[in-house]
Each structure stands twice: as C-alpha cells, then as structure tokens.
C-alpha cells in the first residue's frame, strides 16, 4: 500500500519547516552571503610593513646621501640610518580578509589610508621630505654656528618621501662636520637608526609606523634606535631583542644620548 503523505513521519518534516523557520533559514543564507561579500569588499585601509633603511653617512640607491660644500668634511665610522616603511598605494584598498590576515602578522600593520597618505598623493610626501631636509640642515648648521650662506648641504634619499628622516639627517650633518666635538664620531662606530621629524628649533616630532621601523633597523644591523619620546609605547611593540630604544624630544637630547653611549654615562630608555 502507498505511504500515506499525512502520516506522522511525513507531517513532522512539514511542521519543522514553518514559515518562521523558513524565514530564519533564508536570513541565515543572506547573512552568510553578505559576510562573504564583505570579506572581499575594498576597505579604506593601507597595509604597511618594514621598508629599507638609508645610512645618512653613506650612500643610498647608488648616490651619496649628504653632499656638503663650503666647510671641511670629516671621515666617519658607524651608521646613522633613516628608517622607512612600505605601504600599499594611496589609491589601493585591501579587503577585510586581507586586513585580518595582516593583523595576525607581527611584521605587518594595517592603518587608515588617510593616516599614511593624508593628501592621498605621493607628491605630498615628497614635498614633506624636502621641507624635512631644509629643517634638518638649518638646525644642524645653527647648532654648529655655521652660516648657510657659506655651507651648502644637498640631500639625496632617492625614493624616500615624508618628513620622518629629519632627526637622522641633522645628526649626520653634525657628525660629518664636527663629530662629537672631541675628535670622535657621534656614532662611536655603532650602527644607529632612528626616526622623527625635526623643526627649525630642533624639536623632534612623532611619526608613524615606529614598530615596523624598529624591525627594519634591526634587520639592517642597528643596535640603537632613537625614537620620539611620545612613541616609546609603540616602539616597544615586538621590539627586536638586540635593539636599544632611546627616547628623545630635541636634537640636544639625541646628541647627549649619543655622547653618553660613547662615554659610558647614563642613557635614557623607553
């Protein structure tokens, strides 16, 4: 005899598929589809990772970083490294899936695009780098009581943009012209890296991507990192074991810390 479609077993399946349950099932399917779409939808974020470092006392991308005329230039030892980060382009977006994958990687950071590219253009970063070079030269020559009418400094950092190399450029100009003031090098022969903007008064300002720059510095052999004081907490995130963090607020702080390193004196730390 054919099975009765109204039998209890058959009716129980129909009972489970009530309009409410069918609506919930449909909502679940739609939600899953939306999550899948969102995972690959473009977001206004930029992925960043450790970039190159440029020794301001030496050359970068085949060109001398500092060219100084109008005053005797001394030979130097050690390194004073400008540190950088790399990032996806100002017009590029990353997906939620890519962002989550990057957040799980300690060598990658995901930042709002506007914090990396405030104007959305590479031209702005190049303009900021030119301003940083001018300020670095001004404060270094002022510190040495030298006139910019007689001493000319040309900076060539290749494709590096932005203002964050200011501190290290100032130190390199001083080291090439006067060293530590006592016949030695500011570096003491060390491989020193750092970051931070600098203005004409010698104040060192905060920058972005410090936790990635410390990794770039350690990768390229640095053992000391000069960091804007307000960014100590960021710099301590995943800090390479061999890297000593020194907080600074002004150019005078940086010079005093380097001299203390060379003499065995007290050196501040993050």
Image (spheres, rainbow, N blue to C red):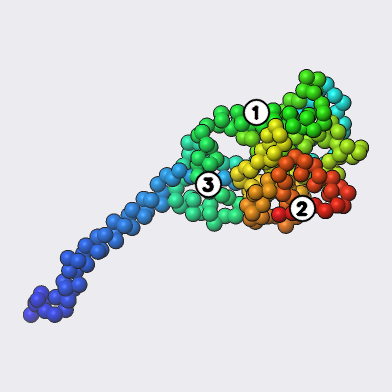
Residue placed under numbered mark 1 in the picture: 130
Label 2 close to label 1 by CB (< 8 Å): no
Would residue 217 appear left or right of 161 to someone viewing this image?
right
Q: Which residue is farthest top?
A: 149
State the image coordinates of residue 134 (x, y, percent, origin top left). Answer: 69, 28
Give the crowd class for mark 1: few <14, some 14-19, many >=20 residues within 10 Å: some
Residue 16 placement: quadrant: bottom left
Q: Which element is circle 2 on? A: loop
Question: Residue at 78% across / 35% down in the picture?
Answer: 172
First-in-chain label (2 vs 1):
1
Name the element at disc 3. strand
Q: Residues within 10 Å of mark 3 (few under 14, many from 20)?
A: some
The front one of 31 and 172 is 172
**Would residue 4 appear left or right of 172 to someone viewing this image?**
left
User: Alpha-carbon distance for marks 3 and 2?
Assistant: 29 Å
Q: Tell me the number on the disc at residue 268.
A: 2
Q: Residue placed farthest to the front in the image? A: 201
Which quadrant of the structure image shows residue 189? top right
Residue drawn at the location 55% of the way across and 40% of the way down: 116
Q: Quadrant of residue 186?
A: top right
* Count of numbered badges drawn on the protein: 3
Residue 165 visible in the displayed image = no
Q: Gap in Å between the C-alphas at discs 1 and 3?
A: 24 Å
For the residue labelled by badge 1, is the local secondary structure a helix, a strand or a loop? helix
Q: In this picture, is 239 found above or below 194?
A: below
Task: Give the CA separation, mark 2 to mark 1.
Answer: 31 Å
User: With respect to residue 127, does 210 lie above or below?
Assistant: below
The answer to which of 233 and 144 lies nearer the viewer is 144
Tell me residue 151's x, y (percent): 80, 23
Rendering coords of residue 225 (x, y %): 73, 48
What residue is pinned by disc 3? 111
Measuring from the top left, give residue 55's x and y in whole percent. 75, 38
């Amino acid at each position: 005899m054919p099975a009765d479609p109204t039998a209890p077993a058959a009716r129980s399946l129909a009972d489970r598929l009530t309009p409410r349950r069918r609506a919930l099932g449909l909502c679940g399917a739609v939600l899953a589809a939306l999550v899948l779409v969102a995972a690959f939808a473009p977001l206004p974020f930029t992925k960043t990772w450790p970039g190159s470092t440029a020794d301001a006392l030496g050359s970068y991308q085949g060109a001398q970083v500092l060219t100084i005329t109008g005053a005797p230039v001394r030979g130097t030892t050690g390194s004073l490294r400008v540190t950088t980060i790399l990032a996806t382009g100002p017009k590029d977006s990353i997906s939620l899936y890519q962002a989550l994958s990057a957040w799980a990687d300690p060598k990658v950071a995901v930042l709002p695009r506007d914090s990396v590219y405030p104007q959305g253009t590479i031209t702005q970063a190049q303009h900021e780098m030119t301003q940083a070079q001018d300020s670095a030269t001004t404060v270094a020559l002022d510190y040495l009581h030298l006139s910019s009418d007689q001493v000319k400094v040309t900076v060539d950092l290749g494709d590096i943009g932005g203002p964050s190399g200011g501190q290290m450029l100032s130190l390199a100009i001083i080291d090439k012209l006067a060293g530590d003031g006592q016949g030695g090098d500011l570096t003491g022969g060390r491989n020193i890296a750092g970051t931070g903007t600098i203005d004409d008064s010698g104040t060192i300002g905060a920058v972005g991507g410090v936790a990635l720059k410390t990794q770039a510095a350690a990768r390229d052999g640095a053992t000391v990192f000069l960091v804007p004081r307000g960014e100590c907490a960021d710099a301590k995130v995943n800090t390479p074991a061999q890297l000593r963090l020194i907080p600074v607020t002004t150019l005078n702080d940086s010079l005093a810390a380097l001299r203390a390193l060379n003499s065995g004196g007290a050196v501040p730390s993050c």
